[in-house]
Amino acid sequence: MAADESVDYEALLERAKKKLPLKVESHERFKIPEPDVMIEGKTTAIRNFADIVDTLRREPDHLLGYLLRELGTAGTMEGTRVVFKGKVATSQIVDRIDNYVSEYVLCSECESPDTNMVKDGRVLILTCETCGAHRPVHVRKHMKAEEVKEIEAGKVYDLLIKDVGKKGDGIARKGEFIIYVPGTAKGVQVKVMIEKVSGTVAFGTLVR
Ligand SMILES: [Zn+2]
């Protein structure tokens, strides 16, 4: 248990360190390059696709997969470009990239683009380098006001620890929420006091 605690403090320290200087810089330097779209016969190319992906700091395949699903077309990467089948309007591409950014890139707490997508068990989580917030990817736009209230800071809940994360924290779920509880083991039913709620991620401590 002591080990879990020390890991947590390290993480907190790291967050605190990153908090101050990054925020200002990040907003200034974050400009998504305008897609350089070119209709070429029966195909449409984004000629600066690699630049866009670099700016967003995401895997090219991830953005490409998203665009193909959203645009309902086929396409492949060719070097630094992406080529879609058919004619696709620039405005459609810009819209979809904007949606991608709000779903998979921007922090929901501070709007910083300095985020990472990490897997915790089977959950894809967006972690923010600027403010330390994390939220599950996908949940943001489906979130409803009443669901948000399922977990509140300062309250105690009976939870089942379903998994243990990379840092050794137990992971419980309640509705859309993921609750991290240090010092627990998988499969254990626990009483948890919620310390902090950030989006749909909550942090709690064991109540004895
Ligand atoms: Zn943030």
Image (cartoon, grey):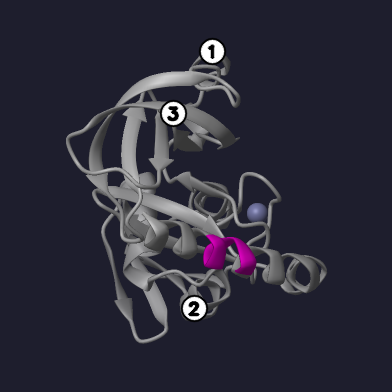
Measured Cα–Cα span from mark 1 to mark 3: 26 Å
Name above or below for residue 144 compared with residue 114.
Answer: above
Residue at 17%, 35% in the rendered image: 187
Q: Which residue is mark 2?
A: 47
Amino acid beneath label 1: Glu
Q: Which residue is mark 1?
A: 146
Residue 20 seen in the figure: yes
Name the secondary structure under disc 1: helix
Residue at 58%, 74% in the rendered image: 55
Dots 1, 3 in contact, CB < 8 A: no
Where does the magenta region start and end?
Answer: 9-13
Name the secondary structure under disc 3: loop
Q: Quadrant of residue 199?
A: top right
Q: Provide residue 185's location: percent of width, then percent of height.
A: 23, 44
Residue 87 seen in the figure: no
Pointer 3 or 2: first along the chain: 2
Q: Which residue is mark 3?
A: 207
Residue at 74%, 71% in the rendered image: 22
Q: Are there few (<14), some (14-19), or many (20+) residues within 10 Å of tag 2? A: some
Q: Are there few (<14), some (14-19), or many (20+) residues within 10 Å of tag 1? A: few
Under 8 Å from ligand 1: the CB of mark 2?
no
Amino acid beneath label 2: Arg
Amino acid beneath label 3: Val
- Where does the C terminus fall, quadrant-wise? top left
Asked whether 142 or 118 is in front, the reply is 118
Question: Is residue 204 on the magenta stretch?
Answer: no
Q: Provide residue 196's location: percent of width, then percent of height.
A: 59, 36
- Where does the N terminus fall, quadrant-wise? bottom left
